[in-house]
């Protein structure tokens, strides 16, 4: 009973009661002032006291931490904490960050014994005789549809019921729709985004390079073999002494080229790592073999072992040839993917 009194107590009284509740003190002592966790929101609540905000987290199984803005009594509950989403933990004036684990479970009252599912939240039922709590849907979960990139979400996006998040399509996919995902009241996402796999238009097409070392010829970059051990998997390698190496592919039709991906070499069977040689790489596009000069992009490098370097071309870059060149010796490509749509 005392517990419920604490919960409904005004903020200023809590400090008097804390000495009796050592574990509450732990929660307060571990508050991270001037910080919050960004873009991992389940739900937000205006006009909530700090302790009610913590309780909201305690009764929601998915919740791991809260952000609280004292100036506006604004509460945000998060599905990650600063350990699981390190890069999202940031300084933010006026905010307080707190982790669920620092608060006594008992603060949740009857809900501390609930068996609510991960996508539910526990609500107290004060006047019911048989049961003191019920589980209601809280969120739509973290979307995991293939091809969807959640790195473009916005500050206010949340996964809770009636909330929405902004997504985009990952590299190698084309996007249609507004990009919004809406969490419906039935706990299911409504996707206003369709990500379609783009075909790799370079695979199997005729390729050439400025010079060739041994049998590491130009075709090795469009053979569909994505292994990165040069000796075993066959990648392209230009000849020793070739100071301006280049490689090109003939797509055999004109395309709007959206992006080019280069799969870099990895560590070989002998443990040798030459992946750093992928540097100062220029990608150009052209309509004829003799004029491949429209810039698509540049990779300064140095590359890392088995890195997939993604180069996005400016919109409406047109061509039927793609050329990769550099101004230092040794150009090695384990695979080159080209994405685009026919003109
Ligand atoms: C953060 O969340 C993880 C995973 O749920 C948990 O193991 C960890 O104890 C939490 N808190 C901290 C401070 O790491
Ligand atoms: C939770 O369950 C335990 C044992 O089942 C019981 O002793 C305890 O009083 C319960 N707590 C609440 C808040 O209902
Ligand atoms: C999103 O960003 C994280 C790191 O911030 C990265 O590991 C992940 O691959 C990115 N996802 C996509 C689909 O680009
Ligand atoms: C909620 O999660 C449970 C499993 O924990 C799952 O069976 C159920 O389908 C989920 N509900 C919705 C609406 O996604």
Image (cartoon, rainbow, N blue to C red):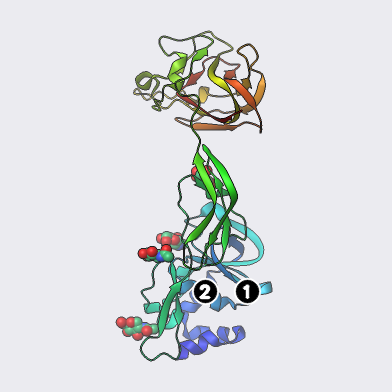
Residue 126 sits above or below residue 150 on the image: below
Q: Name the disc covering residue 54, or none.
A: 2
In the image shown, does 232 or 288 lie closer to the viewer? 288
Q: Horizontally, is 135 left or right of 11 in the view?
A: left
Image position, residue 101 (x, y; %): 45, 69
Q: CA distance from mark 1 to mark 2?
A: 14 Å
Q: Is mark 1 within 8 Å of ligand 4?
A: no
Q: Earlier in the sequence, mark 1 or mark 2?
A: 1
**Is residue 80 in view from this perspective?**
no
Image quadrant in which the C terminus is located: top right
- Residue name at image x 45 percent, y 30 percent: 305
- Residue name at image x 43 percent, y 70 percent: 120
Mark 1: secondary structure: loop
Q: Horizontally, is 117 left or right of 257 in the view?
A: left
Residue 151 sits above or below residue 47 on the image: above
- Residue name at image x 58 percent, y 51 percent: 179
Q: How many marks?
A: 2
Image position, residue 26 (x, y; %): 49, 74
Q: Quadrant of residue 290?
A: top right
Mark 2: secondary structure: helix
Q: Is mark 2 within 8 Å of ligand 1?
A: no
Image position, residue 65 (x, y; %): 51, 66
**Is residue 130 in view from this perspective?**
yes
Question: Disc 1 or disc 2, which is closer to the eye?
Answer: 1
Do residues under tags 1 and 2 come within 8 Å of each other at their CB atoms?
no
Residue count near mark 2 (Cα–Cα under 10 Å), binned few <14, some 14–19, many ≥20: many
Q: Name the disc covering residue 192, or none.
A: none
Image position, residue 234 (x, y; %): 39, 19
Residue 289 sits above or below residue 36 on the image: above
Image quadrant in which the N terminus is located: bottom left
Residue count near mark 1 (Cα–Cα under 10 Å), binned few <14, some 14–19, many ≥20: few
Q: Name the disc covering residue 46, or none.
A: 1
């Amino acid at each position: 009973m005392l517990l419920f009194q604490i919960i409904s107590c005004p903020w200023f009284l809590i400090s008097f009661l804390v000495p009796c509740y050592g574990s509450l003190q732990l929660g307060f002592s571990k508050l991270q002032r001037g910080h919050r966790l960004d873009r991992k929101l389940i739900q937000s609540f205006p006009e909530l006291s700090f302790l009610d905000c913590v309780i909201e987290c305690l009764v929601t199984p998915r919740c791991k931490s809260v952000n609280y803005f004292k100036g506006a009594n604004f509460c945000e509950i998060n599905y990650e904490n600063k350990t699981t989403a390190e890069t999202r933990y940031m300084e933010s004036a006026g905010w307080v960050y707190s982790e669920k684990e620092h608060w006594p479970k008992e603060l949740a009252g009857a809900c501390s014994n609930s068996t609510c599912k991960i996508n539910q939240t526990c609500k107290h039922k004060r006047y019911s005789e048989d049961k003191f709590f019920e589980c209601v849907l809280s969120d739509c979960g973290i979307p995991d549809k293939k091809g969807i990139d959640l790195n473009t979400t916005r500050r206010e996006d949340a996964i809770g019921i009636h909330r929405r998040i902004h997504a985009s399509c990952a590299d190698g996919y084309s996007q249609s729709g507004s990009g919004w995902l809406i969490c419906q009241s039935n706990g299911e996402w409504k996707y206003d985004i369709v990500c379609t796999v783009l075909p790799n238009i370079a695979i199997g097409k005729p390729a050439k390079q400025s010079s060739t070392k041994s049998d590491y010829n130009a075709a090795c970059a469009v053979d569909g073999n994505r292994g990165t051990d040069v000796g075993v998997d066959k990648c392209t390698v230009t000849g020793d002494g070739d100071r301006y190496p280049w490689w090109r592919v003939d797509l055999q039709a004109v395309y709007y080229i959206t992006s080019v991906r280069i799969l870099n070499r990895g560590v070989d069977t002998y443990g040798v790592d030459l992946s750093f040689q992928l540097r100062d790489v220029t990608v150009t596009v052209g309509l004829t073999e003799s004029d491949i000069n429209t810039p698509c992009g540049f990779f300064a490098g140095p590359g890392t072992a088995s890195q997939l370097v993604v180069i996005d071309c400016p919109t409406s870059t047109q061509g039927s040839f793609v050329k990769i060149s550099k101004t230092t010796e040794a150009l090695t490509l384990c695979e080159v993917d080209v994405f685009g749509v026919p003109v």
